[in-house]
Image: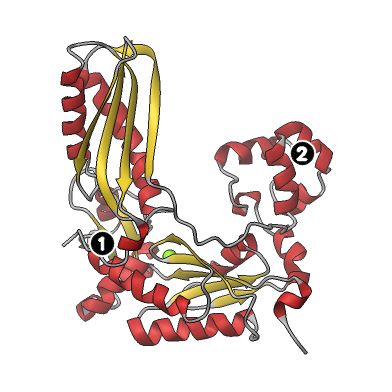
């Protein structure tokens, strides 16, 4: 019997490497085995990018300030970030994905959606084979979630971590979702969780009981989307397009800012958000340059840019000072910070971080 596309049912796999950066450090330095290991910078403002399972037993988590992690776990083996190596491993893993499908959507260096609907084998068998090839060729373990859409596949990949996989068959999706907290739904953050909790909605089962019209009335388009997502209905395609050329954020001040030092802490806060996005959904991209934009009280604007491949606060501060000088002491009404990306196809080969 033919399988797959005939029924219109998709087979989506979400692959997520286990503690990717820390696992690479352990692999490359066997003396680290069995010890709490984390990857992160040494400076006062640094945060952990990854902690292995030993370190997590002490409460160490990614995005935690390094000084806090060292308080919780003084014997923590803290290793510097080696992006060039991680990118290289990520490219090898992506090449393995490419043996199975062209429909690959990377979410970061260590995570991707694959659409394998065209293959005869079941999604779980394909995932098992991919994980086996990754382990054999890189010495690293991966976990996988398998289902009929991206939402459920991503949630499921967390289920049997590390080095495991979980399949949620289409017929089980409704029940699987019902047992989850609403925060597991893609796009449901703190604010939305609060609003839902105020309605007595904590789990997806609670949310499934709310009428679609009611959700639409309260939350508009987002509400209609929630009605579908809490039932595990998600039609988003796996898309391998990566057209974004830059990433930035802007802040318009309620009152114009008259002195340079007042801009610095605002910029630092903006950089934290930018850094999270760069480490998260855009981690597979190579940064080409850093940009600071100022718009002055007379609406004149200027952009200071420097070719640089790491979003370092120090460099942004130099760019801010440069842009400020061009304003001849005019007050600032808008501050923007961002990065420009190198062309995607260059991403796999160029190594800027040695
Ligand atoms: Mg991961």
Kindly identify which numbered label has been placed on residue 83. 1
Return the x and y of residue 42 as percentages of the image width and height. Answer: 18, 52
Instruction: Answer with the quadrant where ligand 1 appears in the image.
Output: bottom left
Quadrant of the rendered image containing residue 334: top left
Quarter holding the C terminus is bottom left
Looking at the image, residue 334 sits to the left or right of residue 240; the answer is left
**Mark 2–mark 1 distance (CA, rounded to whole Å):** 43 Å
Mark 2 vs 1, N-terminal side = 1
- The answer to the question of whether label 2 and label 1 lie on touching residues, with beta carbons closer than 8 A, is no
Q: SS class of the residue under badge 2?
A: helix
Return the x and y of residue 189 as percentages of the image width and height. Answer: 56, 43
Return the x and y of residue 346 as percentages of the image width and height. Answer: 30, 61
Q: Is mark 1 within 8 Å of ligand 1?
A: no
Question: Camera-side residue: 215 or 89?
Answer: 89
Quadrant of the rendered image containing residue 335: top left
The answer to whether one can see residue 76 in this image is no
């Amino acid at each position: 019997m033919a399988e797959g596309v005939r029924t219109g049912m998709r087979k989506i796999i979400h692959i997520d490497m286990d503690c990717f950066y820390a696992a690479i450090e352990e692999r490359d330095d066997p003396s680290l085995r069995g010890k709490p290991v984390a990857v992160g910078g040494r400076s006062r403002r640094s945060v952990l990018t990854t902690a292995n399972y030993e370190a997590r037993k002490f409460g160490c988590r990614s995005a935690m300030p390094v000084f806090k992690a060292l308080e919780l776990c003084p014997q923590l083996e803290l290793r510097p970030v080696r992006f060039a190596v991680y990118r290289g491993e990520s490219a090898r893993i992506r090449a393995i994905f490419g043996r199975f499908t062209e429909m690959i959507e990377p979410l970061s260096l260590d995570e991707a959606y694959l659409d394998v609907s065209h293959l005869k084998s079941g999604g779980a068998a394909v995932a098992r084979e991919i994980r086996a090839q990754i382990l054999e060729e890189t010495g690293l373990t991966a976990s996988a979630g398998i289902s009929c859409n991206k939402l459920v596949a991503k949630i499921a990949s967390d289920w049997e971590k590390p080095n495991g996989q979980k399949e949620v068959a289409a017929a089980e999706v409704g029940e699987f979702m019902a047992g989850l907290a609403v925060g597991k739904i893609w796009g449901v953050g703190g604010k939305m969780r609060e609003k839902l909790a105020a309605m007595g909605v904590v789990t997806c089962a609670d949310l499934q009981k709310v009428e679609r019209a009611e959700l639409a009335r309260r939350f508009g388009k987002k509400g209609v989307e929630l009605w579908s997502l809490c039932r595990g209905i998600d039609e988003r395609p796996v898309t391998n397009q990566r057209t974004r050329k830059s990433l930035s954020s802007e802040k318009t001040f309620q009152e114009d800012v008259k002195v340079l030092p007042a801009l610095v802490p605002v910029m630092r806060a903006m950089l934290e958000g930018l850094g999270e996005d760069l480490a998260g959904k855009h981690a597979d991209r190579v940064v080409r340059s850093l940009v600071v934009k100022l718009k002055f009280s007379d609406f004149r604007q200027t952009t200071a840019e420097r070719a640089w491949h790491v979003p370092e606060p120090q460099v942004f501060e130099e760019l801010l000072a440069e842009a400020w000088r061009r304003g001849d002491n005019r007050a600032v009404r808008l501050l923007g910070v961002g990065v420009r990306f190198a062309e995607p196809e260059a991403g796999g080969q160029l190594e800027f971080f040695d």
